[in-house]
Image: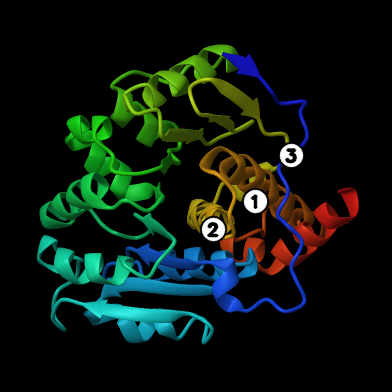
Amino acid sequence: MHDVTSSALPKLAPRKADSHKGDYGRVLIIGGSRGMAGAPALAGMAALRSGAGLVTLAVPRSIQSTVSSFEPSMMTLGLGNQVSDFLLAESKSEILEATASKNVLAIGPGLGSNVSSSQLVCELYQVVQQPMIVDADALNALAKAPECLEKPSGLRILTPHAGEFERLVKQQASCETDKRAAQAAALCGRDRSGRTVVVLKGHRTIITDGQQYAINATGNPGMATGGTGDCLTGIIAALVAQGLCAWEAARLGVHVHGLAGDLAAEQLGEVSLIASDLVRFLDSAFTQLDHSW
């Protein structure tokens, strides 16, 4: 496996003067539960700030109004009845109908650990053909049904932190970078079709597709706060929606995510940094990238 950390970062294509919102992709983010309305909202706002043309959040109907209040640029799809706290497997057909017009899906932010929600994750993982970013409780659902990892129906980007990773692979993540990279690559290898990328988050996040890996250098301890992973999910989803392949989107997304955190920490300090600050500093991060390219 090759270390390509020193190679140039992927680039987004320049925007054409006569382009429209459909040219920059349609993202569907699936998640949320009562008490965790902010997670899918953060992912959605990060996706918009990262250039996605249209973003829809599929959430329990009981929290739809709360989720939609975060940002008027996002669309919402309320599922289930007014009293259900979670997205349930019975909403599968509605979600699949919604995916027909989407370029990329993200699943997991704020989803919760309901049994039916976990069933929904595994079923979608195996039938949705669009690229899918998988995070948070969706990763925990896959950890309970590891056979699903062998049967994705499309490109998959898994974004576990150390705890989620250990639940997925049933072993402790190594503290040594090269061994961590090998462990992440082995998780990619569970997918025999070779369409899975793993982002093993933490200090010096590792990105690998099983054949190559890169170690990210941006980010700081102030990002160790709830919701920052949801932002990363939205960023990567937006980059895929704009045409980057899974490997490119994951590598660039992790870099931009950390850079936004570094820019935020310069002004706010590490102690006071919160996840929504990353969204606020994404514009500066992308501007800095534009100048470096």
Q: Position of residue 268 (x, y in %)?
A: 76, 61
Query: What amino acid type should be assigned to the residue bearing mark 2?
Result: Cys
The N terminus: image quadrant: top right
Residue at image mark 1 = 257
Query: What amino acid type should be assigned to the residue bearing mark 1?
Result: His
Q: Which mark is nearer the camera, 2 or 3?
A: 3
Label 2: state its secondary structure: helix
What residue do we see at 69% from left, 50% from top?
Answer: 256
Residue at image mark 3 = 9
Q: Which mark is nearer the camera, 3 or 1?
A: 3
For the residue pair 267 and 9, the one nearer the viewer reads as: 9
Q: Position of residue 234 (x, y in %)?
A: 51, 59
Residue at image mark 2 = 231
Label 3: state its secondary structure: loop
For the residue pair 22 and 274, the one nearer the viewer reads as: 22
In screen coordinates, is 204 left or right of 229? right
Which numbered disc flags the more N-terminal residue, 2 or 3?
3
The residue most toward the right is 291
Query: What amino acid type should be assigned to the residue bearing mark 3?
Result: Leu
Verify CB contact (< 8 Å) between mark 2 and mark 1. Answer: yes
Label 1: state its secondary structure: helix
In screen coordinates, is 273 left or right of 137? right
Q: Position of residue 255 (x, y in %)?
A: 68, 44
